[in-house]
Image (spheres, helix red, strand yellow):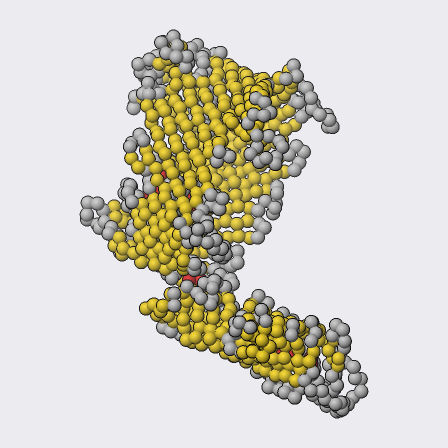
Amino acid sequence: MAVQKSSHIFTKIAFKPLRTNLFYIVLLAYFLTIGSGKLYSQELPKKKQSFPSNNQQTKPKDNPTITPEKTEVVVTKIDTIKLDSLKNKKSVLEGKVKYKAKEYARFDQKKKLLTLNDGAELYYLDYELKAGIIVFDYQKNEVYAGRLKDSTGKYVQLPVFKQGQNVIEPDSIRFNYKTKKALVWNSRTEQGEFRIKAEITKKENDSVYFMKGARFTTSKDIENPEYYFYTSKVKFVPGKKVVVGPTNLVIADVPTPLLLPFAFFPMTEKSRSGVIIPNYNYTSQRGYTLQNGGYYFALSDNYDLAVLGDYYTNGSYGVRFESRYAKMYQFSGNFNLRFENLINSERGYPDYSKTKIYNIQWSHSKDGKSNPNSRFSASVNLGSSKYFQQSLNQVNVSSTLNNTLSSSISYSKTFNTLPQVNLSLTATHSQNTQTQIINMTLPTLQVSVDRIFPFAPKDGVKKGFFKNINLQYNVRGENRIETTDSLFFKSEMFKNALAGFQHSIPLSTNFKIFKYFSASTSFNYNETWQLKTIRKEFNPFINEVENIDVNGFDAFRTYSVSNSIGTTVYGTFNFGENKKIKSIRHIVRPNISHSYTPSFEKYYDTYATDGSGTMIKEYTRFEGGLFGQPGKNYSNNIGIGISNTFEAKVTDRDSTKTEPKKIMLINNLNFSTSYDLAADSLRWAPMRVSGGTQLFKQKMNINFAATLDPYAIDNNGRRIEMFNIDNGGSLFRLSSANMNLSYSLASSDGNKDKKNKQGARNGGREDDLFGTNTDFSDRRESQFGDKDDGEEEEFSGFYNSKLPWDINFAYSLTFSNNKRENEIVNNTVMISANTSLTTKWKVGVSTGYDFVRHGVTFTQLRLERDLLSWRMDFNWVPFGDYTYWGFFIGIKASVLSDVKWDKRSIPDRNLR
């Protein structure tokens, strides 16, 4: 593309702060200083040219032209003779000046001009100036930078000015380096998420700019944005703020009726505190509402806080506190506290109800590199059992259908002693949302000492029975609490707390028998400490047996012996090297174990069940303890187990590979049962069969299990001392079975790693089989899990467009025949699918069918449109217990997240 040398035009400019005497430097570097008593020289790569001072008489040369590739300007004092009595001026050069131009660098001493043409560049300190043409007028103390016109008439080589991290790209610029004022035409600049273009910009000083005809947008295309805010007057303070006059929203170059008399935009790379504008809505049950309004506190660079609230005209309200924190290379986390006071209908009506619900979520993770011997983590999700069913500020059906809320806070430390000692302190919480029963451990203390081999040599291999003898020491202490939702965080929850410790010392060894059999034997000693026991007595006044709590220390001690022997058998079936399936390998791991536990009847006492004292029963004072109770009867069991694995070698489809490909046919197929030598009857336990495999390149997971009982049952469904085959049945009676199948499939460019993280954190699923999570407090995130990475997808043609898609499929089947019911109690299929109709349109659906109840399960339809700087989505649950619809359109950028329209129905709720 040719460049016209004579067609340089100064029209438009982008602004950035100009704070140094850049143009003084260039002027003084190339010309004589007047009355300074110093000479300035110019160093060139190939030849050196210097200019005489005003005191020297030389013949002037008109219009010298210099064409260096790169020139460095330095200050050199070469005259040591005082020429006049004037005091030398202090040099203004603060560093080295570098410049270059592809076409020429021309001096005009008559007009006092220096011109750099075609690819002009100039560098000084942290300033960089690039343009098609740069002209210095040192007589007027001004500098000009502009663009060039190529042979096609298109303007090219627009000026680019950079200072530090700030970059502007104007059409042209005019700058007076004496007054430090400038005029910029068509300035373009970025400030945070904002992109600003102004017709004329006036630089008043280094920190204040005035603009005329400015456009503000977050669009990536500043020249042709899909929307912008137009204002005629702007005061701009770089890095701090923008104050504008009357502002109008323009969409697709069409002015809208949305007009603001004035506006203020904070401009900073750091977070700023500010008001969060609420959403307006209306519900038939609670009236008009303002949701998710509040205030954001930018407390520091390491943590923040958002206080949000909802209010309904019938008196319902909600409050939320959301905080995030992080310290580089140390830890990160977030904390959410939510409370809602829900009023249904109006006071005096029969359907009036009032409910208070809350939820606490805390997630904390520690960087493992900060201290590898110490770890702390937290994952907390606790609160009202009905919070996710009744909350009005989010839609998350997977969390609603979940029956358990769980939490864990743990700290662990490793002491690198000999032997090594590990310590952990954990607080756990498990809450059943159906029964509203809460189980907590506050806390659990665990200390373990690493294995000690007393008979092993310090150096060498441990072989044989004696050298492999090892022992450990473990202690576990718990303070366990069981309470209900209504008593949580009240003093009554600690009334029935149980506390205790259990010490265990396992002594074990392993050895080989006949080279192919691996044998092990172990002796386990346990000592349990309890701080509360019971005493049973008959109370004649109420005519029943009472359990009397006895506070104080008590302990019991038990021991057991176990042995096991097993081996591994490999079998290979070869089909031939020319076959597609070359061979199948079967791995069998049979195992026989024996365990013995004696009777500890010495810990048992008797009590009278009536007033006569004739009916005597035995009990142990350690009933209901944390770690169980000592057994009265001895146990003597033999366990039998067989584990199977099937693998195959097949011809690889890739003809370039010479080795066959290994694939897994069945990951595991296990059979297990046991025989009780101490039992008087029903010695054989039911056989448990379980297995699993992965198919289609490990995209389909299949797991199955079944229980086979060798004994028959009577009419009441109880097992009897008769084998099922002797009762006219088969060898085994199938008492229960289940199968779970899951299959995930995605195109090569589909979103394979898409996860519903907030839904999983609330206690639901990470996939979208039960729909996606919708949090009304922040609608900027895509419901398809996509992230805006700032890059536009390349157009591949109308007939070659990429349409990414993903499918999740799950099937569950459960069979029950414990009491001859012989029925399928669960038979459900679920599916979710997402695809892109175009590069900007996405649709998704989650649905399923229950073949037992003959009905469609939860169904959700999703639609989303990427509008570049905007995002639009529609979410619809057409039927069921949680019908809902919602429409949202808004700007993606956080700085303008309040520019949105959010309309939705409140999900149906049944307050119970």
| Quarter holding residue 483 | top left
Residue 716 shows up from this direction: yes
- Residue 530 percent across, percent down from the top left: 48, 28
Left or right side of 683 for 907: left
Q: Is residue 706 above or below residue 324?
A: above
| Quarter holding residue 429 | top left
Name the residue: 65% across, 37% down: 416
Q: Nearer the viewer, residue 652 or 362?
A: 652
Q: Is residue 594 above or below residue 342?
A: above
Name the residue: 44% across, 68% down: 216
Residue 601 shows up from this direction: no
- Residue 248 percent across, percent down from the top left: 37, 70
Left or right side of 546 for 182: right
**Residue at the far right in the pictured view:** 81
Q: Nearer the viewer, residue 881 or 633?
A: 881
**Residue at the far left in the pictured view:** 349
Name the residue: 55% across, 30% down: 663
**Quadrant holding the N terminus:** bottom right
| Quarter holding residue 137 | bottom right
Q: Nearer the viewer, residue 462 or 111?
A: 111
Q: Nearer the viewer, residue 373 or 140?
A: 140
- Residue 559 percent across, percent down from the top left: 54, 20
Q: How many tags in the picture?
A: 0
Left or right side of 650 for 756: left
**Quadrant holding the C terminus:** top left
Name the residue: 33% across, 19% down: 819
- Residue 302 percent across, percent down from the top left: 53, 56
